[in-house]
Amino acid sequence: FKDETTPFEIIERHPNLATGEIDIIKRTVSQDEGARPDSTIEGLAKLKPVFANKGSVTAGNSSQTSDGAGALILVSEKILKQFDLTPLARFVSFAVRGVPPEIMGIGPKEAIPAALKAGGLTQDQIDWIELNEAFAAQSLAVIQDLGLDPAKVNPIGGAIALGHPLGATGAIRSATVVHALRRRNLKYGMVTMCVGTGMGAAGIFERM
């Protein structure tokens, strides 16, 4: 992820219980801190359901609470020429659709076909898909219902592994798609996610 991240310095304040003073520590954050490489299948299997006694959703198959920030620079073709800019990708199409709030997680199921139609593309033409994993259950449902190729979905990990900083995830996942297309010489990528009230959104990028 080095191509799509910028290290930054943070200041931490830690209370010293022995002296009552506040210790100030400066450090540089250069990579996601939510990844848990020590996780095991056995450990995840022992986690208790969080919503229902016999449910399948646990802390291990849900996106983690994370802090983060993301930014994109999106310009028109006119501005691109005016300032002689070199684009990383073209924003092909975008769509928002909805499902009943009770099944909010599968909003992408409706948004993805709409974005494809708006872009004049077929599902098979999409080389890389960042499907935000609010929960594993909703991601699996979208993959199954639309018949997405699992090998193209979150090839380097999704929100369960990397985190889901609300408000920033869309920009972060978009950066991941754009850089992945360039690294692997692929043409089309998609970012899609659900929204708490039942909406789903999907956007398609083309490598330039």
Image (cartoon, helix red, strand yellow):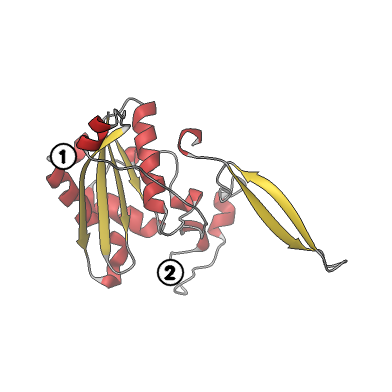
Across and down, in percent, residue 40 comes to: 58, 49
Residue 4 shows in this picture: yes
Q: State whether residue 52 is above or below residue 83.
A: below
State the residue in front, 61 or 203: 203
Across and down, in percent, residue 164 comes to: 45, 55
Answer whether labels 1 and 2 touch (C-beta < 8 Å).
no
State the residue in front, 103 or 42: 103
- Looking at the image, residue 42 sits to the left or right of residue 11; the answer is left
Quadrant of residue 75 within the rendered picture: top left
Say which residue label 1 marks.
122
Say which of marks 1 and 2 sits in front: 1
Quadrant of residue 153 within the rendered picture: top left
Across and down, in percent, residue 81 comes to: 23, 30
Gap in Å between the C-alphas at discs 1 and 2? 35 Å
Residue 107 shows in this picture: no
Residue ID at (22%, 40%): 76
- Looking at the image, residue 75 sits to the left or right of residue 157; the answer is left
